[in-house]
Image: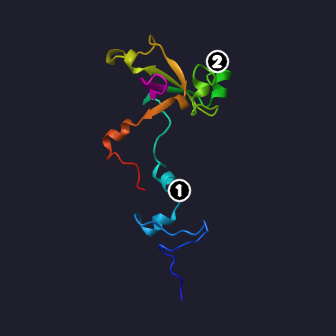
């Protein structure tokens, strides 16, 4: 006869690999670890800026227009620009800034106008590591505003 492994008030199994499901989920979902379910739910979420998108400068909390990706990582940025973006200003204290960050050319939206958006040559641009930028998911404006199901 098979053993019933549904959780009970007296279940005292100490085996951490033994799953018991969850009351508020389908049994199959309860068996999957939470981290795995979150990873699946977030698999298609864009977390890095892309050219033409918007981002928030996490230091100044201002909206940015992301014009271009200028380097694949901060070491490549240093080699091409001769400037250490990894240790600039507050970057060493920002947990998201690492040498693996891509670098992006950005413009503060407050400095732009619709009349001059096609000619950015006179505008001041700034380069940021990806870890300083919070993506603005503008594409979510046309979605149902949910991220997967847990």
Q: Mark 2 — residue?
A: 83
Residues shaded magenta: 56-67
Percent x, y of residue 30:
47, 64
Q: Going by the image, does 122 lie left or right of 69?
A: left
Percent x, y of residue 20:
51, 70
Q: CA distance from mark 2 to mark 1?
A: 39 Å
**Relative to 32, does residue 84 appear above or below in the rendering?**
above
Q: Secondary structure at mark 2?
A: loop
Q: Which mark is residue 36?
A: 1
Q: Which mark is residue 24?
A: none
Q: Which label's residue is closer to the chain start, 2 or 1?
A: 1
Residue name at image x 63 percent, y 18 percent: 81
**Relative to 125, does residue 129 appear above or below in the rendering?**
below
Residue name at image x 40 percent, y 64 percent: 24
Quarter location, residue 19:
bottom right
Q: Secondary structure at mark 1?
A: helix
Closer to the camera, 119 or 124? 124
Q: Give the class, few, some or many, for how many residues have Cα within 10 Å of label 2's Cα (few <14, many ≥20).
A: few
Name, please, the residue furthest toward the bottom.
Answer: 1
Percent x, y of residue 140:
36, 41
For residue 117, say whether it is visible: no
């Amino acid at each position: 006869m098979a053993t019933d492994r549904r959780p009970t008030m007296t279940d005292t199994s100490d085996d951490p690999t033994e799953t018991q499901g969850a009351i508020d989920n389908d049994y199959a979902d309860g068996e999957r670890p939470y981290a795995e379910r979150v990873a699946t739910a977030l698999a298609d979420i864009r977390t890095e800026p892309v050219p033409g998108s918007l981002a928030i400068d996490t230091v100044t909390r201002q909206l940015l227009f992301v014009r271009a990706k200028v380097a694949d990582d901060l070491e490549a940025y240093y080699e091409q620009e001769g400037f250490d973006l990894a240790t600039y200003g507050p970057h060493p204290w920002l947990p998201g800034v690492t040498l693996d960050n891509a670098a992006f050319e950005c413009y503060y939206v407050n400095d732009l106008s619709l009349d001059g958006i096609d000619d950015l040559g006179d505008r001041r641009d700034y380069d940021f590591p990806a870890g300083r930028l919070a993506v603005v998911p503008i594409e979510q404006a046309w979605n149902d505003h949910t991220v997967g199901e847990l």
